[in-house]
Image: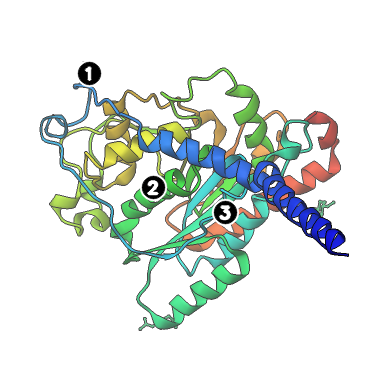
Amino acid sequence: MYLKKKTLITICILLYVYWIFHDAFHSPKDHSLTYFNERRETLKNTEIILQSQPKGSKVDKRYYDNPQPYEYDFKNLINEPVLCSQYEKVFLLYTVRTIYSHLDRRKVLRKIFQDIPYDSFSKDIVVKHVFLFANTNNYTTESLIREESRIYRDIIQDDFPESYGNVYLKTLMAWKWSVEFCANVEYVMVLNDELFVDQIKLLPFLHYDLSQADYDNKFAFCYCFGGRELMHNKLKKFRKLGEKMLYQGENYPIYCHGVGYIAHINVINKLYLASLKNKMLMPDDVWNGVLSEKLGIKQNCQNHRVQASKYFGSILKSYWKNPFLVAVCDHDNRPEAAVPCLQGIYKSVSKLRNNSNVHNRLQ
Ligand SMILES: *[C@@H]1O[C@H](CO)[C@@H](O)[C@H](O)[C@H]1NC(C)=O
Ligand SMILES: *[C@@H]1O[C@H](CO)[C@@H](O)[C@H](O)[C@H]1NC(C)=O
């Protein structure tokens, strides 16, 4: 009797030990944590090299001669710490700059982000998105944001005032969050909520077109602007921020338009690290150009893949031949046009796909 009991206990202990080790070695979660942590360490310990001003540079000299350090230290109010780290790898992360009242835009974007093509590469990939909020300091709005966060679990909120002048902080927030909480991602897209993304075309583009690309030193997708005289000093929305917040000089460098760009996480990491040594100024996309030039990161302009949404009727006629990946739903300064435009393109594009043999096309 005594021996039997002892044997039973031993078996139980063995089983328990097996269970513990089995869990430690075989749980996919632990595996992904290892990959995540390794990549995060690498990103954190990256040494960035800021070059001296190249010939032909249009950046004002003062930003090479006298860079200002910066520390982003706003408290986090809402986070999704395991959104990425629960997976071994994430292929693409969208970080969307939005404000609370743009509920309807988020509704369309959430649908778009679920569109995964049927090709053999895409079937197992993970695509994630987060919406970036600041603090509205309005009790009602804040509780609505928390409610939306509870439902969709795709909101990140940091504690700086929600305002146009702080839109550059959302860019920093996008870079910082990607590096700290989504280190296991390949590509990051930073975008505004008025951008229609054709994800069915974008995912194969990132996979096939860029498989030979130099991930570390160029953007994956950039809508190139700049390279000419300053314009923002004529606009009231910038002027009222005050000179100290604004890029000074005579010319802009070439930069990726802030409406949306995509880069490998290594590039996002370099931009973030460089922004801590070169305090960001507005317009923040111009500053992205300054940082890129200092880092030697090439824009890789893809302007032929960007559509002005106003003309989407005609582009849809040749949809399958058209290389467009994104459409800008922000025209004539009419913010109210953005939702019908996003919805309109989304609907037309899904109809076209439903009516054609999209399954074969992408295989
Ligand atoms: C706070 O937000 C609510 C709805 O989001 C709005 O109706 C209200 O006017 C706002 N209050 C203030 C003081 O701005
Ligand atoms: C396309 O097909 C999907 C599923 O088959 C359906 O949910 C969607 O409503 C269709 N879209 C249009 C615009 O017909």
Q: CA distance from mark 3 to mark 2?
A: 15 Å
Rendered image: mark on residue 176: 2
Are circles 3 and 1 on residues that touch, CB within 8 Å?
no
Of helix, strand and loop, which one carries label 2? helix
- Vertical order, 290 against 147 (above or below): above
State the image coordinates of residue 184 (x, y, percent, origin top left).
Answer: 54, 40
What kind of residue is marked 1?
Pro
Q: Position of residue 97 (x, y in %)?
A: 45, 55
The residue pinned by badge 3 equals 83
Q: Is residue 349 left or right of residue 172?
A: right
Work out how far the residue at label 2 is from the one at label 1, CA to CA, in angstroms.
28 Å
N-terminal label among 3 and 1: 1
The mark lying in front, picked from 2 and 1, is 2
> What's the residue at 53%, 59% (across, down)?
337
Q: What element does badge 3 sit on?
A: loop
Can you identify the residue that label 1 sits on?
Answer: 54
Q: Earlier in the sequence, mark 3 or mark 2?
A: 3
Q: Is residue 227 left or right of residue 69?
A: right
Residue found at x 27% / y 57%: 237
Residue 54 visible somewhere in the drawing: yes
Disc 3 residue type (three-letter): Leu
**Splitting the image into four quadrants, where does ligand 1 fall?**
bottom left
Nearer-the-camera pick, 228 or 154: 154
Circle 2: is it few (<14), some (14-19), or many (20+) Cα within 10 Å?
some
Give the vertical position of 92 relative to 72 (above or below): above
Q: Position of residue 43 (x, y in %)?
A: 41, 35
| Mark 3 vs 2: CB contact within 8 A | no
Q: Which of the two residues, 88 or 306, is positioned nearer the viewer here?
A: 88
- Specify the amino acid type for callout 2: Lys
